[in-house]
Amino acid sequence: QVQLVESGGGSVQTGGSLRLSCATSGYTYSPYCMGWFRQVPGKEREGVAGMGGSSTYYADSVKGRFTVARDNAKPTVYLQMNSLKPEDTAMYYCAADPTTCLHRDLRDVVVGADFAYWGQGTQVTVSS
């Protein structure tokens, strides 16, 4: 059974950085298709980044500021968040799926939130 555990959230000031981690269990390596999402109460969930093999996707709202990376030795997926803004405040979730992005555009997979496994989330708060 695949389990995802996020960590690394916290409170930072505008312009600060955080690195979120998503530790995966149940696989020798982190699943091929990974995604990062965020949600603010009362708003729709937003897919901010994805990774499928060596391919990556970023939402326009985070492009140039967020970077997704994988460490198969652990196995863990990271979301490096730089130049944080108050509008980045949200609960952040990682998601995983072994196959969903194999024959589909990664953007479509992330936008559609088409992942089988989800973590419990980690809160990120950015103050002005």
Image (cartoon, rainbow, N blue to C red):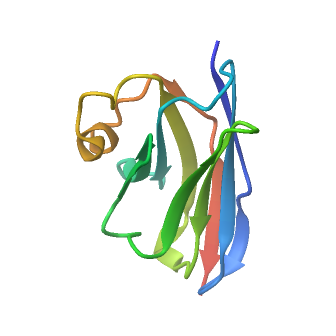
Taking the view exactly as shown, the residue that stands out farthest to the top is 1
Image vertical order of residue 109 relative to residue 40, above or below: above
- Image location of residue 9, percent across then percent down: 70, 59
- At a point 69% along the width and 23% down the height, the residue shown is 28
Side (left or right) of 110 relative to 53: left
- At a point 61% along the width and 32% down the height, the residue shown is 30
Tell me the quarter of the image containing the N terminus.
top right
Side (left or right) of 77 relative to 102: right
The part of the image, by quadrant, that contains residue 22 is top right
- Image location of residue 8, percent across then percent down: 74, 56
- The answer to which of 72 and 10 lies nearer the viewer is 72
- Image location of residue 23, percent across then percent down: 71, 38
The part of the image, by quadrant, that contains residue 48 is bottom left
- Image location of residue 75, percent across then percent down: 70, 36
Tell me the quarter of the image containing the C terminus.
bottom right
Side (left or right) of 98 relative to 60: right
- At a point 50% along the width and 68% down the height, the residue shown is 66
- At a point 66% along the width and 56% down the height, the residue shown is 20
Image vertical order of residue 88 relative to residue 36, above or below: below
- The answer to which of 29 and 39 lies nearer the viewer is 29
Side (left or right) of 35 relative to 105: right
Total numbered labels: 0
